[in-house]
Amino acid sequence: MKLLNDKKQFEKALAIFDQHGINNITTLSNFAITEVLKACAHMRDIQRGKIIHNLIASETKNDIYVSSTLIHMYVHCGDMASAQSLLDSTKTKTPSMYGIMMKGYIKNKQANKANDLFNEIENPNDVNMILLFNACAQLKTKEALDLVKKTSKEIPKSFYSNPRLLTSLLDALMKCGDVAHAESLFYSSKHKVLPMYGAMMKGYVDNNLPEKSINLFNEIENPDDVNVTILFNACAQSKTKEALDLVKKTSKQIPKSFYSNPRLLTSLLDALMKCGDVAHAESLFYISKQKVLPMYGAMMKGYVDNNLPEKAIDLFNEIENPNDVNMILLFNACAQLKTKEALDLVKKNSKQIPKSFY
């Protein structure tokens, strides 16, 4: 089963279990149990996972690896209540178990619960710490900021050699609005990695400081596609001629492989439109082979921002399966146009859109 799991052939792994293991589950090793539970998690087969959970012996359930895998299975399948109940009943709780739960709560937009769990951990590891900072970044409150500052003072110095932890800490400080503290930490760090630059650049954009984001980008020797994407976001926020010139210059210098990143292309289109260069944006859009819905959205919003609602409507009509964002932009374009034809189009589309959009 492990070989099949490693090859991501989870259905085959479960088929082998159904054929040979389900009737002899009490004789299976803990290792085999963890492998079948991993397959259940990846397949999101919670019903089978629950059956296995109920069939295995109590001593097997108490094995920390089996317990961790069970918790992971429930979290991965979105059953946080069962995962929490299992954690509460587990005698020997490990930092890894807490980490699985914290990650699940963050994914489900329940950052406060992740923070509460963190406070239960006697000796949190660097992964727990990263997840705490991620939770605080999601909360964006003064209380979250205070917790970030307090925790960052208490953690072992060795943790600061972990670039992922530093990136999460910078992101949390920025998301909670403490730009000065983030800057102090960033510039005192000896080994700066690209994600740290990214966290700072994004933080500047989030705090309406696009010039600082642009200046920091210029310090990077070999920016990656994420750094370039954030640069375009900063330039879009700046909306100046200098920003437009930088967008054009950078778009010519980046590796061709970057153009296969739809998020980067969307940000580039948005920046060109926000800076008023509609023609350049159109040229880039129409030569792009793989157009995703956010790219259509960036173009439509750009047309509306540049008082070209007819072009936004025409582009909408080219989309096969528009999403709710495309639909909103269509209505914005029609509102800007204020004609009988625009009203008819609004009425027609409002009848056709999926009920879920409402």
Image (spheres, rainbow, N blue to C red):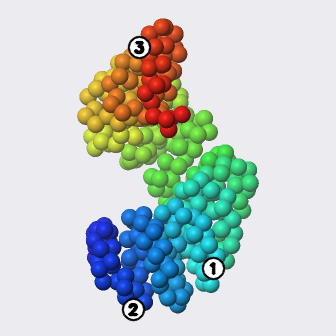
Q: Which amino acid type is marked by label 2?
A: Thr
Circle 2 residues within 10 Å: few <14, some 14–19, many ≥20: few
* Residue 272 appears in the figure: no
How far apart marks 2 and 3 lie (CA) works out to 70 Å
Q: Secondary structure at mark 1?
A: helix
The label shown at residue 27 is 2
Horizontal and vertical percent position of residue 191: 49, 60
Contact flag, marks 2 and 1 (Cβ < 8 Å): no
Horizontal and vertical percent position of residue 119: 69, 69
Horizontal and vertical percent position of residue 276: 45, 19
Between 130 and 57, the residue placed more toward the observer is: 57
Instruction: Residue under label 3, please give it.
Output: 310
How far apart marks 3 and 1 lie (CA) works out to 61 Å
- What residue appears at the point 68 percent right and 73 percent down from the top-left corner? 120
- Whichever of callouts 3 and 1 sits on the residue coming sooner in the sequence is 1
Horizontal and vertical percent position of residue 266: 40, 35
Q: Nearer the viewer, mark 3 or mark 1?
A: 1
